Image (tube, rainbow, N blue to C red):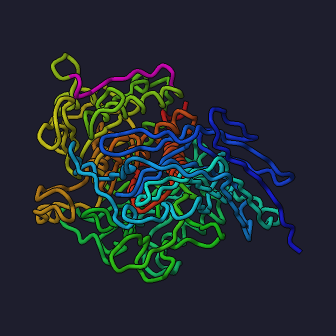
């Protein structure tokens, strides 16, 4: 007979004044559940505040953790709490009941959410209202709460199940001009406890997956990692495709990673291999995969946004299990179209976005490139931060991406935020500003000449915040308007001028398609309309983010970039793509020491704090990591 445990009773109260009281809490909203007894917590908010904003209203509740943003639907406050229960728990039952519901009449409509790609921002963009909501008497959202369940790791690396409960303290009936709000929620979670957990096998920390022809070039890196105590092993792509079954080569690779995780206890996966040619490559073999032209297969997801029909996603390889403890194929309906959400005529898939392992890719094309990135990693990790005085420099490069926020151009605000997060871990860090607001001063501005000068000084970290495509990154002057007043930015062709040599930063690139690593020269040259590679006929051998890492000597030790559009909410710069990028530096500031921990932790923090709709899934899956996920930030002392 199974033992049924009642693990938590939570009361969330919305009252005038008050504060927060709980038995266990932190800024990421993660709670450790106590199975021995019930616990209680109370969340005290203010009553809803009605603020006029232009022709509409914005509803705020002090103490809410986030806002409900669905494109063209009303923006409302929400409260998210994440709980964790042991891996293997079954029959999870969740109830959530609103208490003391009150109705209020409004004088105007609540404003709708405006979500747009960074490349299509306009200062006077028009607010659009979803008629299915705004012409209805039904309350939105349709329920007072929802929840989702996923599988992942807690901060100590233990396998757990995450239960995310999303409460809507305010609901809205547009045709009736009314809101309903509640002063409390009663939440109960029950589950069938698993048996004794098996001890984790920790045979290896990282597996490197690459073609056999790269193995000898990767051996120095494997030897170096093992000498540093990070147990590393090589696995050839050719062997995986013979030894493992799956619907296509990417799934075969994922099944191997799952077995390596189960039997070896790996934490990191380094994929070494991109397209086989810089000149020309057919990068897709099906709507969801590419392998014939690739050294290591790639997965494309089907989560369309604007003209992006489907983006490259290496996160696919890191998300191994769903909450039921079953292999997560990302093709739940088995129609051969992976991670489908919102694609025309395609049923939606259910898939888990919590990574079990951290995945990075070095999309090299030939042995020479392998040699260069291996040498860069070994050199970087061979000395610690104390031997790298340049490591204490943070370079922020930004301008006015959308608009102003808290008195600053929003791109500059995001760079300052990233610096302040990072400084928590590195108190002596200084900020070098390459800002559009330095115009008409002696300071650096976001033009190629100044970006190259700043980059060449060396830095531990660099944050770009602006607009982009696979070739270029750019932004708008602080006193300018989109799309007329560009600062100039920097292109891939300027990377030859970077003179930082062994002073290698980790670079986070905020912009559209800067990480689109399926480009090749003839394909981009042919794509005059920019409908597939977004270069508009300009020939390109590699993308911007990967080009920074590939640059030798100099460039970056690692980078991030979007393989699709970078997305954002109008009026909130710390949203969607930029929220992930800000979370990256938050993780560094809170003690994450390895690159993959930082990247995966940023995704997990996003999942903990936001309700996931199609656009959120889009930005999470298209956020690529170019680098060794086991990289120790600053190197080994």
- The residue lying toward the viewer, choosing from 333 and 61, is 61
> Residue 432, how many percent across, how many down?
33, 23
Residue at screen point 79% across, 56% down: 7
Residue at screen point 58% across, 42% down: 228
Magenta stretch in the rendered image = 426-438
- Residue 84 sits above or below residue 411 on the image: below
| Rendered-image quadrant of the N terminus | bottom right
Asked if one can make out residue 292 in the rendered structure from this viewpoint, the answer is yes
Residue 278 in which image quadrant: bottom left
Examine the structure image and report whether residue 430 is included in the region drawn in magenta.
yes
- The residue lying toward the viewer, choosing from 213 and 70, is 70
- The residue lying toward the viewer, choosing from 472 and 212, is 472
- Residue 495 sits above or below residue 242 on the image: above
> Residue 86, how many percent across, how many down?
74, 59
- Residue 84 sits above or below residue 500 on the image: below
* 125 relative position to 329: left or right: left
> Residue 53, how many percent across, how many down?
35, 40
| Rendered-image quadrant of the C terminus | top right
* 107 relative position to 45: left or right: left
Asked if one can make out residue 298 in the rendered structure from this viewpoint, the answer is no
Residue at screen point 42% across, 31% down: 417
Furthest-right residue in view?
1
Furthest-top residue in view?
442
> Residue 369, how many percent across, how many down?
31, 52
| Marker count (numbered) | 0
Examine the structure image and report whether residue 376 is included in the region drawn in magenta.
no
């Amino acid at each position: 007979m199974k033992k049924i445990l009642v693990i938590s009773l939570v009361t969330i109260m919305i009252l005038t004044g008050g504060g927060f009281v709980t038995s266990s809490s932190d800024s990421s909203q993660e709670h450790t559940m106590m199975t021995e007894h019930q616990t209680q917590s109370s969340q005290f908010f203010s009553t809803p505040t009605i603020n006029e904003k232009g022709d509409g209203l914005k509803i705020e509740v002090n103490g809410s953790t986030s806002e409900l943003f669905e494109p063209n639907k009303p923006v409302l406050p929400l409260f998210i709490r994440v709980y964790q229960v042991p891996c293997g728990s079954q029959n999870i039952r969740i109830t959530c009941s609103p208490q003391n519901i009150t109705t209020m009449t409004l004088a105007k409509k609540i404003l709708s959410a405006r979500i747009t790609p960074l490349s299509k921002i306009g200062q006077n963009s028009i607010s659009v209202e979803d008629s299915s909501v705004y012409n209805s008497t039904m309350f939105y959202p349709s329920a007072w709460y929802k929840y989702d369940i996923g599988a992942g790791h807690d901060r100590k690396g233990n396998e757990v199940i995450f239960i995310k409960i999303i409460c809507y303290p305010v609901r809205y009936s547009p045709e009736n001009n009314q809101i309903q709000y509640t002063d409390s929620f009663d939440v109960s979670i029950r589950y069938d406890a698993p048996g004794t957990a098996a001890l984790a096998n920790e045979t290896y920390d990282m597996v490197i997956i690459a073609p056999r022809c790269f193995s000898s070039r990767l051996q120095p890196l494997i030897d170096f990692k093992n000498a540093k105590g990070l147990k590393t092993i090589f696995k050839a792509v050719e062997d995986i495709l013979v030894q493992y079954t799956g619907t296509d080569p990417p799934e075969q690779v994922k099944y191997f990673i799952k077995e390596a995780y189960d039997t070896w206890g790996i934490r990191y996966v380094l994929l070494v291999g991109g397209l086989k040619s810089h000149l020309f490559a057919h990068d897709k073999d099906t709507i969801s995969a590419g392998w014939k032209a690739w050294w290591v297969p790639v997965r494309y997801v089907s989560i369309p946004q604007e003209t992006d029909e489907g983006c490259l996603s290496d996160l696919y390889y890191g998300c191994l299990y769903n909450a039921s403890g079953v292999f997560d194929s990302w093709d739940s309906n088995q129609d051969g179209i992976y991670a489908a959400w919102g694609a025309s005529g395609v049923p939606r898939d259910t898939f888990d976005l919590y990574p079990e392992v951290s995945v990075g890719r070095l999309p090299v094309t030939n042995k020479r490139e392998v040699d260069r990135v291996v040498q860069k990693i070994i050199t970087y990790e061979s000395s610690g931060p104390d031997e790298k005085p340049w490591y204490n420099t943070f370079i922020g490069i930004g301008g006015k991406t959308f608009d102003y926020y808290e008195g600053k151009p929003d791109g500059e605000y995001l760079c300052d935020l990233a610096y302040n997060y990072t400084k928590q871990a590195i108190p002596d860090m200084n900020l070098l500003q390459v800002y559009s607001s330095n115009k008409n001063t002696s300071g650096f501005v976001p033009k190629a000449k100044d970006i190259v000068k700043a980059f060449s000084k060396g830095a531990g970290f660099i944050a770009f915040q602006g607009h982009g495509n696979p070739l270029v990154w750019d932004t708008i002057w602080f006193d300018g308007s989109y799309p007329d007043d560009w600062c100039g930015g920097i292109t891939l062709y300027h990377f030859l001028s970077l003179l930082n040599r062994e002073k290698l930063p980790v670079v986070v690139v905020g912009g559209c398609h800067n990480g689109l690593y399926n480009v090749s020269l003839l394909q981009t040259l042919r794509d005059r309309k920019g409908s597939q590679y977004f270069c508009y006929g300009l020939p390109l051998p590699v993308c911007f983010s990967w080009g920074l890492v590939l640059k030798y000597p100099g460039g970056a030790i690692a980078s991030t970039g979007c393989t699709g559009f970078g997305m954002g909410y109008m009026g909130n710069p710390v949203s969607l793509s930029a929220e992930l990028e800000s979370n990256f530096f938050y993780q560094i500031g809170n003690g994450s020491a390895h690159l993959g921990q930082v990247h995966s932790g940023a995704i997990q923090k996003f999942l903990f704090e936001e309700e996931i709709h199609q656009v959120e899934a889009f930005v999470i899956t298209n956020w690529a990591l170019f680098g060794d996920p086991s990289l120790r930030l600053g190197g080994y002392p």
